[in-house]
């Protein structure tokens, strides 16, 4: 494939920059063209190297990672992957249109998943569509839940409960707004208070009383209302044909 994409690494810690280089060695299509120790160096290197991807630390001397984006403006930034030891900046990172947010020390598997998505984005150009993520605030900090990991979502007043397997997260956003966000990503409304990721449904079953359920791989059974039944089944068939 050859070296296709230029990478800039910005982190004030030499060990962290070296760690990114080591992880990137497994991906020969990406070449590190420069390293930066602070925000000012990063702004200069963006002009000099015009990288496709920037691995950006949040906390650096002088200008921090968010300052770099603000000075450069999001429209002129390459694809940004934040790499930091602190999870409390996750929400700000995605508000700044970051592609991903990796917590140090990042595992090889997590890094590989990011690189696979980066390659898809870069091969597809600006028109490539990325899976959204939910940034969920918890007592322990921010949790990032990729949409592809979500099985189903149910309404709880002004909140939604997002289910990934047997784990759930409470997220402050009305179901109607969530539904707009996930539209086009393989979800269908099961009833007025729940939407289901179609790929998570293993079968659609009918009980002795004639009630219809979507049975999920996690073991959850989500009822499908009479009103939504035809549209849900049509979405299941369409999804099956498009796989």
Image: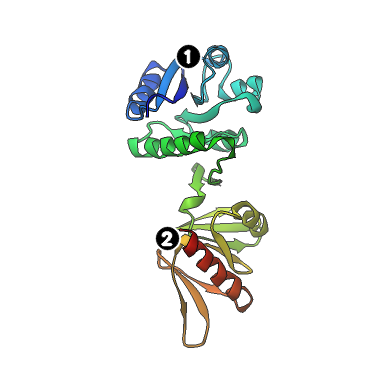
Q: Which mark is residue 7?
A: none
Residue visible at 36% across and 20% down in the picture: 18
> How far across and down, in percent of the image, does residue 97 sit?
60, 34
Residue visible at 59% across and 58% down in the picture: 160
Residue extending furthest toward the front? 1
Q: Where is the C terminus found, in terms of image quarters?
A: bottom left
Is residue 94 depicted above or below 48 in this figure? below
Q: Where is the N terminus found, in terms of image quarters?
A: top left
Task: Inspect this view and state whether residue 31 appears.
Answer: yes
From the viewer's perspective, is 98 left or right of 73?
Answer: left
Q: Which residue bears the numbered disc 1?
A: 37
- Residue 158 found in image quarter: bottom right
> How far across and down, in percent of the image, does residue 240 sit?
47, 64
From the viewer's perspective, is 225 left or right of 203?
Answer: right
Q: Which residue bears the numbered disc 2?
A: 166
Question: Label 2 crowding class (10 Å Cα cut-off): few <14, some 14-19, many 20+?
Answer: few
Q: Whole-Å distance between the Cαs marked 2 and 1?
A: 42 Å
């Amino acid at each position: 494939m050859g070296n296709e994409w230029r990478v800039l690494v910005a982190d004030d810690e030499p060990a962290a920059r070296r760690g990114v280089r080591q992880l990137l060695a497994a991906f020969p299509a990406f070449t590190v063209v420069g390293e930066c120790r602070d925000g000012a160096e990063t702004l200069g290197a963006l002009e000099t190297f015009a990288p496709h991807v920037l691995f950006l630390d949040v906390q650096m001397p002088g200008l921090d990672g968010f300052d770099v984006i603000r000075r450069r403006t999001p429209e002129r930034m390459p694809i940004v992957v934040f790499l930091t030891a602190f999870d409390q900046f996750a929400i700000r990172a995605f508000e700044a249109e970051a592609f991903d947010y990796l917590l140090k020390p990042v595992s090889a598997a997590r890094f590989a998943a990011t690189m696979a998505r980066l390659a898809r984005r870069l091969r597809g150009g600006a028109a490539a569509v990325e899976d959204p993520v939910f940034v969920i605030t918890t007592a322990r900090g921010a949790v990032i839940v990729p949409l592809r990991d979500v099985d189903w979502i149910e309404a709880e007043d002004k909140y939604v409960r997002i289910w990934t397997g047997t784990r759930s997260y409470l997220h402050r956003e009305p179901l109607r707004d969530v539904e707009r966000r996930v539209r086009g990503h393989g979800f269908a409304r099961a009833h007025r208070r729940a939407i289901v990721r179609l790929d998570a449904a293993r079968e659609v079953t009918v009980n002795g009383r004639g009630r219809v359920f979507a049975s999920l791989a996690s073991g959850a059974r989500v009822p499908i209302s009479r009103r939504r039944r035809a549209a849900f089944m049509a979405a299941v068939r369409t999804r099956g044909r498009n796989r």
